[in-house]
Structures are given as C-alpha cells and as structure tokens.
Image (cartoon, rainbow, N blue to C red):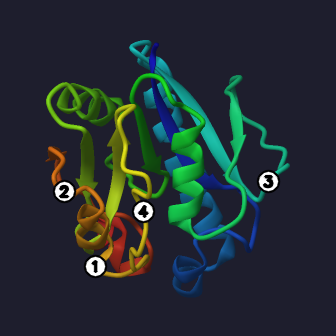
Amino acid sequence: MKNTVVVFARAPRLGTVKRRLARDIGDRQALRFHVGTLLGLLRSLRADRTFRTVLAIAPDRTKVSLPWPLPLLPQGFGDIGQRMDRACRRFTRGNVAIVGCDIPAACAADARAAFKAMGSAQAVFGPAEDGGYWLVGMGPRRPARPFANARWSSEHALKDTLVNFAGRETAQLRTLRDVDTVADLPSRR
C-alpha cells in the first residue's frame, strides 16, 4: 500500500487560525501566513507521486476551497494527540506521516526522508526547535497509545512522546521551526 502524508490544519478562517501570532500581527496577517504556508506545503507534497497526501481539517465538516482536489479527513474531537492517533489508525497498511501546517521550511523531501527512515525505524520524528515536533511517522506496527501523556504545546512534547516508543527503533529528521508567535517568523531570525 502507498505511504500517506496527513497534513494537520485548521480551516482557514479569519480570527480562528494562528491566534498567538495574530495577537502580534493581526488576524488578517495571521490568516495570510496560515494560508500561504498551508498551500505551499500542500503544493510541494502533491507534486510528489511517491506518496498520497490527505488534509486533516478542523473543525470537522468544514468546507475548504483548494486550487486542486485533495482528500479531506475530519480531525475529530480531543487534544492533538488524540486527533493524531485517530488519523494514524485510519491508515493501518503502509506508513503514515503526520505533518503540521505551520512549518514554512517543511516540504516533500522531508516526507520522503521520513518514509526512507521508516525502512529501518518503526517511527520517525521531525523535531521542532521549541521541543515539540513538526512531523511524526509510523509504520503499521505502532504502540497502542503513541501519544499518551504528552505535554502538548510545551518543550516536553517530543520527549514525552518518545517515552511511548521505548524499546522501538526511532529516527529523527532535521530540526525545524514551527511558527506560533511573531518571534518565530522566518524573517525575524
């Protein structure tokens, strides 16, 4: 079965995306950033035919207008770990990688690197500079609760998640920066 990349995103609506960023730059600029980063990532992923790309959207039942057809998947309820776990369980054959949409440097080459790493590892993580992760990939043999007890939106998220993979071979990709606040924007570095 073909590998799958699931992009996690909030529906692009004014005042509902990148709220911490919006406090500094305003709702319109935050929406512009969100849409630009999301479309750039989806464009890159769609161009690569070695895997399929799916968009997991929140809130559920949201209509999203994209320049091209793309399968949509509702994220459902719960914290980010519960939503990622649910998305992974939808793809029980082949490898699945979940990617956040607020990482300007992420691209199809990262997804290919993740799937290549899963040739020898059971899971792969793309560490974020803030201690979280921007990508998680797993093969069909997954822990029962891969995202249990993680302290989300903290510098402990990756370390906490790795505890769930104890005794399993894991790999890490390059470290990237996700954008949560104005200080995280690439031009601010």
Question: Which structural element holds mark 3?
Answer: loop
Q: Earlier in the sequence, mark 4 or mark 3?
A: 3
What residue type is disc 4 on?
Phe
Q: Nearer the viewer, mark 4 or mark 3?
A: 4
- Determine whether 182 is above or below 68 in the image: below
Label 2 vs label 1: CA separation?
15 Å
Could you tell whether 77 is left or right of 162 in the image?
right
- Label disc, if present, on residue 175 of the rendered structure: 2
The residue under label 1 is: 156
- Determine whether 176 is above or below 180 in the image: above
The residue under label 4 is: 147
Q: Residues within 10 Å of mark 2 (few under 14, many from 20)?
A: some
Q: CB atoms at circles 4 and 3 under 8 Å apart? A: no
Label 1 vs label 3: CA separation?
28 Å
The residue under label 3 is: 60
Q: CB atoms at circles 3 and 2 under 8 Å apart? A: no
Across and down, in percent, residue 51 comes to 43, 19
